[in-house]
Structures are given as structure tokens and as C-alpha cells.
């Protein structure tokens, strides 16, 4: 087996358990370094670190799968890891719909598997894990006997690994428009064409967190996508709900979700540019009891973090101005490059410029089926905040 030796001065990140080894952290390589193959990693003085897969074309040279020298990377290894991931979700109460595998947090780097009742969506985001896709699919078939498995590898990050963008069935074909149950609601999921894996399961618990503040309220939801938060607001007793999204297709699906739950008379949607509308309506002095903001990630690179912070500050400032005194702002950020402290600081700066005082109701991360490993920033990505605006 090919051996990779780390430089003498490696970062504490690797020593403390992080599975990523960057190209500039590796010194000598003994043997071939064919992309996707399993290699052994050692310190500069030949102490065993772990086994993982290598890709010389990637900035992340090696992603470790195990630090146990007795553990072999084979089909049985992946079955065990999937079984362990499933047992964790069962223990914490996420069984019907959940993120079954959350990459590094489940010791399966670059692998994402979402479970939508009896259907599964897979993303293999690095060359090494992509090579094991047949074994992963076989393990899913054995453990779950699913109705269908779909591949959503139409993700640009795969190009950094030299992988093609593709999507399609990994099982017998099935209808990819499915209905799931979430918090007592029926929601349509488009496995083939929806964003990411078709539905944002990471906000599952956070959608339930709005149930008290929206009762009897006039609610505005910006960047609503398929209306998951807005449908929940209607279900929890909002007087009126208006959702805004730039995508005509997303708005059509949001309207369908309202219909599925008998909420068409309460939940309305408009296909508009939410950035422009927030700015215009705040100037016009429109007011709502609750404003909900759930924008897409504003950055995926460290070089544009400042631009992202400016964007978050701007939309939250506009959102605050649209909230009646004593009402509530519900706001999220889904980029791990903007860590929680920086996000809260940005919200506070927006409040200062808006001349509003804030009182925190709750501040959370993603649902627990997307576990956070302390010190691994990429696992701690979602920020969800409810503030009273005074």
C-alpha cells in the first residue's frame, strides 16, 4: 500500500483528529499515488496516523477513513459505517426523514446520504469515495431495502476532484416527486431537480421553533424556496403569509405545498427578486409581525467572506426595518465560512444601522442528524436565529 509521510511541522488539526490532509502537509510519498486509491499515512518519524483515499489533483490530498491500523477499507467497512450512522439517528429520534450520512462527522468524508422515508439520495463529492459508490449502494440495499436510490452528483465541487457532474438512478427508476411528512405537514420533495438533495432537512427542527411567534401574525418570508418555513407558519396559525423567491419553479412548488396542507388561503407566494423587494418595501414603510430570511450561501471561498458579510448585513437590516416594534426576525446563514460569532456580530451591526434593539429568543445550529464535531468548521455551518425587534 502506498505510504504518505507528513511534514515534521504538521498542523494540530491533523493530530487532533481532523480527517483532511492538505497537499502542503505531506512530504514523501512511497509508492504510486493514483487518484482514488487507499493509502496509509504516517508522521515524519513513521508513526501510523491512519488510512484514507488520495487524490493528487485535489488541494485535500488525503481524506482519512480510519485511524485504526487493524481496520481494512473494504465493502464490509462501508456497511459497518452506514449501520453505525443509522444507529446514531435512531438513538436521537431521526428515522423517517434524516441526513443518514453527514460526511466527515460520520467518518465518511465527502459522502452525503439523505433519507426521505423509503427513498435515498446520495452525493459522492470526492474521487476516493466515488470509487466506493457501488459498495455504498449495496450496503443501503441490504440495510434498508429502499424503494429507490437517486444520485445527485450535479455539484460543482466534484469538478475540483476531476469528477464529472451527473445525476440519475442508482436503483430501478421511480417517480422522483415524493411526499414526506415533517412536523405534521405534507411536503413535496423533488429529488431530481430540487436544490442539493431535493429538500433542506437541516432546518427540520428550526421550522418547528417558529410555532409560537407566528400565531395570529402577518408573516413575510424572503428567499422562501419551496415554502417550507412559510407552510409551517400557516400551519402554526399565522393570519397571513407571503413568501418571496426569484425562482418561478420554486414558487410553483411552494404553492403546491400550501395546497397539500389546505393552506392556500393563508400562504401566498410571489416570484420576485427578494433583495430588491426588501429594499423597496423597507423604504415604503411596510410592516409585518414576523419577517423570515433564509438566503442561499453568499460565499463558498474565503476570498469573498467580506462580500458575504456585507450581504448578510444588508438583508438583515432591511428585514429589521420591515418588522413591527415588538415583532420578530427569523434569520439564517448556511455557509460554514461565516462562523457563529461572526454571524451574530453582523446581525448586531445591522441592528445598529437600522436603529433597532434586539432581544434574542433562540440561536441554534442545524438539526442533530447533521452532527457537529467540535473544531471541524465544515460540520458547524448553519446558523438559525430568532430575535425580537424592539
Image (cartoon, rainbow, N blue to C red):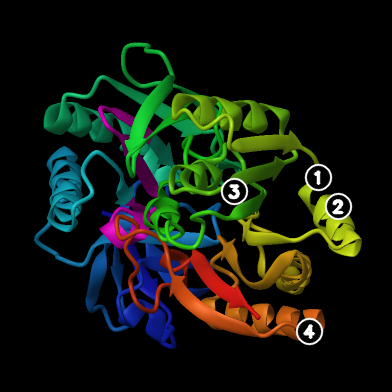
Distance from disc 3 to disc 4, alpha carbons, whole Å, reads 44 Å
Pointers 2 and 1 in contact (CB under 8 A)? yes
Find residue 276 and name its label: 2
User: Where is residue 169, by image quadrant?
Assistant: top left
Q: Residue at x 79, y 79 (%)?
A: 354
Q: Residue at x 40, y 80 (%)?
A: 13
Label 3 or label 4, whichever lies nearer to me, is 4
Q: Residue at x 55, y 32 (%)?
A: 194
The part of the chain drawn in magenta is 102-121
Name the quarter where the N terminus is drawn. bottom left
Residue at image mark 3 = 160
Establish if 289 lies above or below 218.
below
Name the quarter where the C terminus is drawn. bottom right
Label 2 or label 4, whichever lies nearer to me, is 4
Mark 3, other Cα within 10 Å: few <14 / some 14–19 / many ≥20: some
Q: Nearer the viewer, residue 161 or 250?
A: 250
Residue 287 appears left or right of 52: right
Find residue 355 and name its label: 4
Amino acid at each position: 500500500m502506498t505510504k504518505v509521510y507528513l511534514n515534521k511541522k504538521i498542523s494540530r488539526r491533523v493530530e487532533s483528529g481532523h480527517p483532511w490532509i492538505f497537499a502542503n502537509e505531506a512530504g514523501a510519498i512511497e509508492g504510486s499515488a493514483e487518484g482514488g486509491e487507499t493509502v496509509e499515512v504516517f508522521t515524519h518519524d513513521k508513526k501510523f496516523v491512519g488510512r484514507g483515499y488520495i487524490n493528487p489533483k485535489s488541494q485535500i490530498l488525503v481524506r482519512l477513513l480510519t485511524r485504526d491500523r487493524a481496520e481494512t477499507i473494504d465493502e464490509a467497512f462501508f456497511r459497518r459505517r452506514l449501520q453505525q450512522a443509522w444507529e446514531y439517528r435512531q438513538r436521537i429520534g431521526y428515522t423517517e426523514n434524516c441526513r443518514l450520512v453527514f460526511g466527515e462527522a460520520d467518518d465518511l468524508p465527502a459522502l452525503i446520504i439523505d433519507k426521505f422515508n423509503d427513498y435515498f439520495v446520495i452525493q459522492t463529492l470526492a474521487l476516493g469515495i466515488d470509487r466506493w459508490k457501488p459498495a455504498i449502494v449495496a450496503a443501503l440495499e441490504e440495510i434498508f431495502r429502499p424503494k429507490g436510490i437517486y444520485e445527485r452528483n450535479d455539484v460543482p465541487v466534484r469538478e475540483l476532484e476531476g469528477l464529472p457532474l451527473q445525476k440519475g438512478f442508482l436503483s430501478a427508476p421511480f417517480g422522483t416527486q415524493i411526499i414526506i411528512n415533517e412536523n405534521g405537514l405534507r411536503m413535496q420533495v423533488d429529488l431530481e431537480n430540487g436544490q442539493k438533495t431535493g429538500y433542506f432537512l437541516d432546518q427540520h427542527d428550526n421550522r418547528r421553533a417558529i410555532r409560537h411567534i407566528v400565531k395570529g401574525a402577518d408573516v413575510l418570508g424572503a428567499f422562501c424556496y419551496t415554502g417550507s418555513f412559510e407552510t409551517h407558519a400557516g400551519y402554526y396559525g399565522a393570519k397571513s403569509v407571503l413568501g418571496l423567491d426569484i425562482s418561478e419553479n420554486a414558487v410553483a412548488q411552494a404553492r403546491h405545498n400550501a395546497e397539500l396542507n389546505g393552506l392556500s388561503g393563508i400562504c401566498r407566494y410571489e416570484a420576485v427578486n427578494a433583495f430588491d423587494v426588501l429594499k423597496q418595501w423597507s423604504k415604503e414603510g411596510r410592516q409585518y409581525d414576523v419577517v423570515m430570511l433564509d438566503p442561499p450561501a453568499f460565499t463558498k471561498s474565503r476570498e469573498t467572506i467580506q462580500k458575504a458579510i456585507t450581504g448578510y448585513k444588508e438583508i438583515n437590516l432591511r428585514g429589521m426595518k420591515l418588522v413591527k416594534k415588538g415583532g420578530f426576525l427569523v434569520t439564517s446563514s448556511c455557509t460554514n465560512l461565516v462562523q457563529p460569532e461572526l454571524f451574530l456580530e453582523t446581525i448586531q451591526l445591522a441592528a445598529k444601522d437600522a436603529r433597532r434593539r434586539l432581544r434574542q429568543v433562540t440561536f441554534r445550529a442545524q438539526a442533530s442528524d447533521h452532527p457537529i464535531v467540535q473544531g471541524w468548521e465544515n460540520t458547524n455551518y448553519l446558523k438559525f436565529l430568532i430575535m425580537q425587534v424592539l
